[in-house]
Image (cartoon, rainbow, N blue to C red):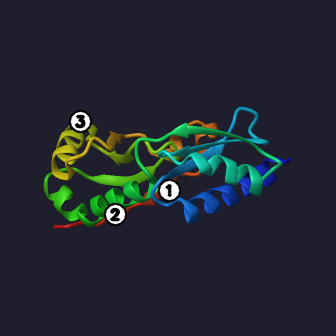
Amino acid sequence: MTDNAAKAKLLQIEKFCAERYPEQFAGVSLGADGKNNVVIYTRPAPELRHLVELAFPEVTVTVKDARHSRRELQGLRDQIARDLVRWRERGIVIHSIDIPPDGSAVEVHTSDPVHAAAWLEEEYETDAVVTTTKPASLLPPTSRDTPHLHMELPQRRYD
């Protein structure tokens, strides 16, 4: 399978899982060989692996546990995005927000990750937020090849 074919297959598997298991599915990435192996991150859903293997017999499936579903993290990401003006008023400029496929957390890219981390955790009462100054576009190529849900945020002046 070519790189483009592998990425296309990855997107098909991602759609398949997200539609059938929205409360469990967190994400999918290419496995070690980058072509015929996929890793599915999910909250407990024992039948998911079997269904993916039936629908996509040409790939080898590995299932890994996720702390949060994509749906849960999308809700948190959307709430943070709705609160951008309030965060800017507190001196926290949020540049972008990502949801990596492993279901670990929402990644908030900001100019002040130390202060943002404490405030975001307190405000949303969750440990599902990770702050960093390094957006996904600056990650190594293997990380970029994995589908992230990325939200680039406009940098407006709020004077």
Among numbered discs 1 and 2, the one appearing first in the sequence: 2
Pointer 1 local density, CA inside 10 Å: few below 14, some 14–19, many at least 20: some
What x and y, as percent, mark residue 81?
A: 31, 62
Answer with left or right where residue 50 lies relative to residue 134: right
Q: Which amino acid, by three-letter code, is at mark 2? A: Asp
Answer with left or right where residue 108 lies relative to residue 56: left
- Spatial CA distance of label 2 from label 3 is 21 Å
Pointer 3 local density, CA inside 10 Å: few below 14, some 14–19, many at least 20: few
Write down the quadrant of residue 9 in the picture. bottom right
Residue at the farthest left position: 90
Q: Is residue 99 visible?
A: yes
Badge 1 vs badge 3, beta-carbon distance below 8 Å: no
Badge 1 vs badge 2, beta-carbon distance below 8 Å: no
Q: Is residue 146 visible?
A: no
Q: Looking at the picture, does residue 35 appear above or below residue 148? A: above
Q: Which amino acid, by three-letter code, is at mark 1? A: Leu
What x and y, as percent, mark residue 133?
A: 37, 40
Among numbered discs 1 and 3, the one appearing first in the sequence: 3
Quadrant in the picture for the C terminus = bottom left
Residue that mark 1 sits on? 149
What x and y, as percent, mark residue 145?
A: 64, 46
Residue that mark 2 sits on? 78
Residue that mark 3 sits on? 114
